[in-house]
Amino acid sequence: MSTFHVVPGESSVETEVRSSLHPIHGRADELSGAIDAEFDGDGGPRLDLPHAGWVELPVEAIRSGNRLNDAEMRRRAEAGRYPTVRFEVKRVWAVDGTRRLRGAFDVTAHGRTHGFEEDFTATLDGDRLVLQGEHVFDMRDFGVDPPRILTLKVEPQVRVRVRVVAEER
């Protein structure tokens, strides 16, 4: 089995929440993690073999470019008490007739773990693996109430886009 290690700075998590005025975007590129997988000669994943993976990011690393928004997000997320968000792969399978994959994942944030399924892509180029996908979460599922920032009302749904670049070592 090959182990691919997440490359910080090239990997990222982007977030988007809607507010009563405009969307609020966040980004973090201080990811860590590892993916264990085997690939065939065409670069496709060998899903019949064991596979696993995890990606983690510090809550403090998520930045919107607005200090007020960032401070409120960290306060609501209780970043001191729950300093990381962690994604873990439970199972992956092929989506019929495409190069897309579907995975079952657990995400742990704010001390709560929730499972979800989502489609994503996996591209192998030499010893570099690139995974990309997105999912919409409801922050209330993790015990976080949507904030009000001054006059802005923030919706509870958070769109999360993940791009993982990992290198085999």
Image (tube, rainbow, N blue to C red):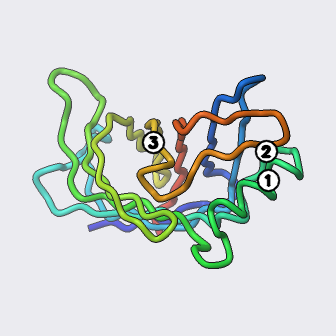
Residue 135 or residue 94, whichever sits in front:
135
Between disc 1 and disc 2, the foreground one is 1
Q: Quadrant of the N terminus?
A: bottom left
Residue 137 shows which numbered tag? Answer: 3
Residue under label 1: 70
Q: Are marks 3 and 2 in contact (CB under 8 Å)?
A: no
Residue type highlighted by circle 1: Asp
Which residue is at 66% across, 36% downward? 154
On screen, residue 56 versus residue 21, left or right, reads left
Q: Residues within 10 Å of mark 3 (few under 14, many from 20)?
A: some
Distance from the alpha carbon under mark 1 to that under mark 2? 6 Å
Which residue is at 20% across, 29% downward? 95
Q: At which x and y percent is residue 143?
A: 48, 59
Residue 53 or residue 5, whichever sits in front:
53
Distance from the alpha carbon under mark 3 to that under mark 2? 18 Å
Residue under label 2: 64
Q: Residues within 10 Å of mark 2 (few under 14, many from 20)?
A: some
